Amino acid sequence: MTSTRTVLRETPLLSKNAASEPGLAASGAWPLMAYAMLAVRFVQGFIYWGGGSRRFIYAPQKLDPHAASWMANKFQSAMPGALLGTGHIVDFLLRHFALLYTSIIVFSAIELFFGLFLMVGFLTRLSALATMGLSFVLMLLYGWQGATCIDEWTMASCNFGMGVALFLAGSSAWSVDAAIARRKPELAARPWFNWVASGPLASSVLRPLALVLTVVTMAFVMLTYNYYRGAILTPFHSGPTSPTVHHLTLTHATSSADGSITFTVYLDGGTPEAPVHVVDAKLLDASGKVQQEWGPDVLAHLPQSAIVNDYAYNKFKPALLGLAAGMGARATITLPGTPGQTIAPESILALQTIDNRVFKALVQPRAAQ
């Protein structure tokens, strides 16, 4: 009797149907898989629980729209390199506060609860599937970022692979799922319980499912890596969106009759860990001769009315030396004109950053209203 009870404890999720099938279930390998995945289950759960708990418990200012660490700032920083059109979704949410706040709360709650569920082994397969979805979304948004390497890509890839492994293995031992199955065997015998919680899957299901998920994981990891860095289908490159060097895109540069210049500037590359600093602006004629110049003192004292930011979070704003902006900031800026100044045709606006990088745009006469 003792040995029988021991076997039942060691294989708590073996239903009558599963035990009669050949393969992993009949051999008692499911609990062994669960033991092998204990550390993976804890780490995957802790990573996502940690993300949610920081916002809800340990650093609630991340959910405070008035705090400097408000999550919308990080959300906006992902926009320049976001994949598959998710940048447009970010843009839409940043313009609609209620939807933005709801999205951040829901995303954080999913991290918190499903991370906790994985750590204790509750609804393991459903929780693993949720973390796979989170990893996929994080890859699309933040996969391009990383100051020394593509750190966010590494995190998203590893978490996706860990989620796949946990989804396939479940937690058939040392888990809440196992405790529920021992106390309610009639519940564990129902097919849906295996799919949302834990338990053995028939070999005829497990093998093709594992193959499909492995192929999906390989494609997910290699295609995103090739996009961000190449070195698989193309030579190694620094990525379409630089995660280290700030880049400004200037558009809609126009001149007015009073000599003022209005343009749109978008910080669409570089590290979100440090702001860009614009320290000089020049208006050049076609030969490169300076017609007007706005130095750091002028830029640092532009009136608020001269800087119209698209978003309420990361902004272009006056700083000690010129203008400063966080990643993803976009604004329409008006530089004051010089009385009596005539702007030559095909003039070029040039902005210079503190690291001596220069970004240019052709200036067009503004159409008469």
Image: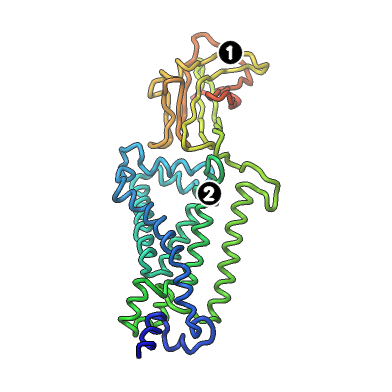
Q: Along the horizontal axis of the image, is 35 left or right of 54?
A: right
Q: Amino acid at mark 2?
A: Gly
Q: Is residue 282 above or below residue 12?
A: above
Q: Nearer the viewer, mark 1 or mark 2?
A: 2
Q: Nearer the viewer, residue 125 or 192?
A: 125
Q: Amino acid at mark 1?
A: Gln
Q: Residues within 10 Å of mark 2 (few under 14, many from 20)?
A: many
- The label number, if any, that marks residue 173 in the structure image: none
Q: Image quarter for residue 183?
A: bottom left
Residue 17 in view of the camera: yes
- In the rendered view of the protein, which quadrant contains the N terminus? bottom left
Residue 328 in view of the camera: no
Q: Position of residue 291 (x, y in %)?
A: 58, 13
Q: Residues within 10 Å of mark 1 (few under 14, many from 20)?
A: some
Q: Position of residue 219 (x, y in %)?
A: 61, 60
Q: Position of residue 264 (x, y in %)?
A: 50, 30
Name the residue carrying label 2: 143
Please, what secondary structure does the residue beneath circle 2 have?
A: loop
Q: Position of residue 74 (x, y in %)?
A: 42, 42
* Coloration of the structure image: rainbow
Q: Is residue 28 above or below residue 43?
A: below
Name the residue carrying label 1: 291
Earlier in the chain: of badge 1 and badge 2, it is 2
Residue lying farthest to the front in this orientation: 2
Q: Nearer the viewer, residue 341 or 161?
A: 161
Q: Nearer the viewer, residue 290 or 355?
A: 355
Q: Residue at x 61, y 15 (%)?
A: 344
Q: Residue at x 34, y 84 (%)?
A: 185
